[in-house]
Amino acid sequence: MNTRLIALLLAVPAAIQAQSKNVDWPLYGGTTDNTRHSTLGQITPANVRQLQVAWTYETHDEFPGSEMQPNPIVIDGVLYASTPRLRIIALDAATGRELWSFDPTFGKPSTQRFRHRGVTVSGDRVYFTHRNWLWALDKSTGKPITTFGDSGRVDLRKGLGRPIEGVTVSASTPGVIFEDLYIIGSTVAESLPSSPGDIRAYDSRTGELRWIFHTIPRPGEFGYETWPKGAYKISGGANAWAGLTVDHKLGMVYGATGSAAFDFYGSNRHGDNLFANTILALDARTGKRVWHFQGVKHDLWDLDFPAPPSLVTVTRNGKPVDALAQVTKTGHVWLLDRKTGATLFPIETRRVPAALLDGEKTSPTQRLPILPPPLVRQTLTERMLTTRTPEAHASALKIYRQYTSRGLFAPPSKEGMIIFPGVDGGAEWGGPAYDPESGLLYVNVNEMAWLIKMIPRTDKSLFDNNCASCHRSDLKGTPGTIPSLVDIGARKSRDDLIAIIRQGQGRMPGFAGSLDNGAISDLANFLITGHDVAETAKTNPNYLKYRNDGYNIFLDHEGYPATKPPWGTLNAVDLNKGTIRWTIPFGEYPALAAKGLTNTGTDNYGGPVVTSSGLLFIGATTYDRKFHAYDKRTGQLLWETTLPASGNATPSLYMVDGRQYVVIACGGGKNDAPSGGTFVAFALPKE
């Protein structure tokens, strides 16, 4: 099918929509294929500069460090979304007026940071998750549907084959609907102890569990031999945290999973670790595996697949092929046949370095696509260090020489390594947008280096380094001023201690920004048992000899990226040819731009939306708080505005009463950027 015929066919629904007064944005990602494409054509390259604020809605839910990342759902003129404190709201999509609000904490909100990307709306129901609960609300009133689960909610901790009190699970991304099933992935801890990332389907009416796919295989299941015997009992991760995609015609659901826990040291999980870092195709009715494609074997670099698969149609030998496009943290794009999982571009298998840490065993090979070429640089060298100022270069060079930089798949070490692209490198959870008219896939990527050093685990040293200055090395504190922690395990549960260490309490600061989950867990264990982790290693199935020293972006002495720009880009990838059509720097640091250093790019989170009328809408940039409209053909900036806070979310396009809107959640909060809690909708002036 040629490009002109595709354009003509697409013009038919566009013409129908032009006559319609209401056009919805009914799903996370816009459509069932997760392509973030809109055929609405009222806003065009010719008039986009006339866009103005149509309405705003202030949640008043933001707090320091909070984030708000929902892709709003719009159905029949009503907008549904979540707030920084995870209230669920319904707004008049034409005015922003609140219609109802539901607070799952019932007036006891937490200041714990949530990353939540919205809701699923189907029939008369709104589905969403809060911590370990899956809720179903009445779409008209916002009240729980009491016939769903237990008085309106289902406990996601159940059904994972672990004691419920030891399971920590939630879901940051909305689930998908197939027939009468609600299918969902999960968010679990990335360090041990961690829960398995099983994909589950629930009856959308009753909340009954209908099927489950074990991403850490059990005896007799495909892939069991890629883990140590019995790993399913204690291992965690391998979770489709970024969301799922449904092909209703084929009756298949697709997911892309994250790494196995622990991210950077896997002495207890020798093997390839299926189905971690895997694109999965499941029978949507039964949960049975149809095919799989593993992108990274025995991941030691936190190279999760960061977004749900996008279902696209490409041209091969003059014929259309139903395909699946999957973006990665390494800046590559995998293009697979949707029915079989076969790769549609050549790939290479490369030998990679052996493990450096005792007890570890890396996979001897990894594979990467040859086409399209990577969207980010793959190895950091001294020549690529910042030259922003002599002082910045000197500080970057000093740090660089303290670490090793050997490119993709170099193993972690006690000496320290530079992960480039970084832990948040390449594509991110916002995912790409796909234009079926041109075959272009639009991907925003980060190009930031991260520093990772592995250190021996010892809980006592953690306590001495972080807590003893206040609570004293003997844990007795200062009576009347600093509380004693002696026998704290008799007064607080493990979960309570982890929450306090992570969030802080009273005058005590939270340590979520300086300690990873593993370190926080070790601290809690020490406070409860009084024993160093090394003393209990023989009886602790989650004991690992090493942990990382935190998640540290490679920055210069003034807090800017220690590499030469670009630090983030926006790209158009031709999926028919496997080429990059255009690439531009994406984002700026206002303070640097004021000094003349512009077009540097920045880290960016949230995705684009492409339109048949020729536009690409995207917020995403962390520090300049901009919302942009680009010419989708060339990458030329056509319009931009400044938001109340960074729009680290994917916008939604819809029409109400014949007027087209584009709305975005302005939540900020990424990498120390100011937090926000505002939804802003834009439209052309009324005639």
Image (tube, rainbow, N blue to C red):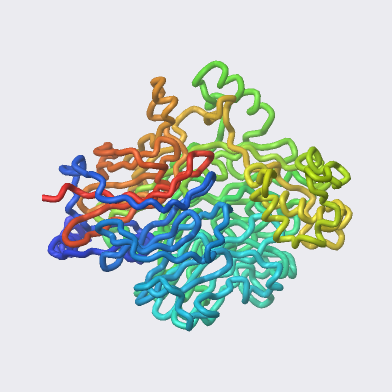
Q: Which of 101 and 519 is in front in this view?
A: 101
Q: Which residue lies furthest to the front in this view?
A: 480
Rendered image quadrant of residue 33? bottom left
Give the residue at x 58% y 42%.
408
Q: Residue at x 24, y 50 (%)?
A: 54
Count of numbered circles in the view: 0
**Residue for point 49% across, 37% down:** 377
> Does 225 sit left or right of 287 as displayed?
right
- In front here: 83 or 25? 83
- Residue 151 appears at what percent x and percent y? 52, 79
Q: Is residue 183 above or below residue 40?
A: below
Image coordinates for residue 520, horizontal then vertical, percent: 71, 51
Residue 481, how many percent across, how many down? 78, 43
Q: Residue 255 at x, y = what percent?
A: 49, 64
Q: Can residue 666 be seen in this view?
A: yes
Q: Quadrant of the N terminus?
A: bottom left
Report if residue 278 is visible in the image.
Answer: no
Residue 158 shown left or right of residue 531 in the figure: left
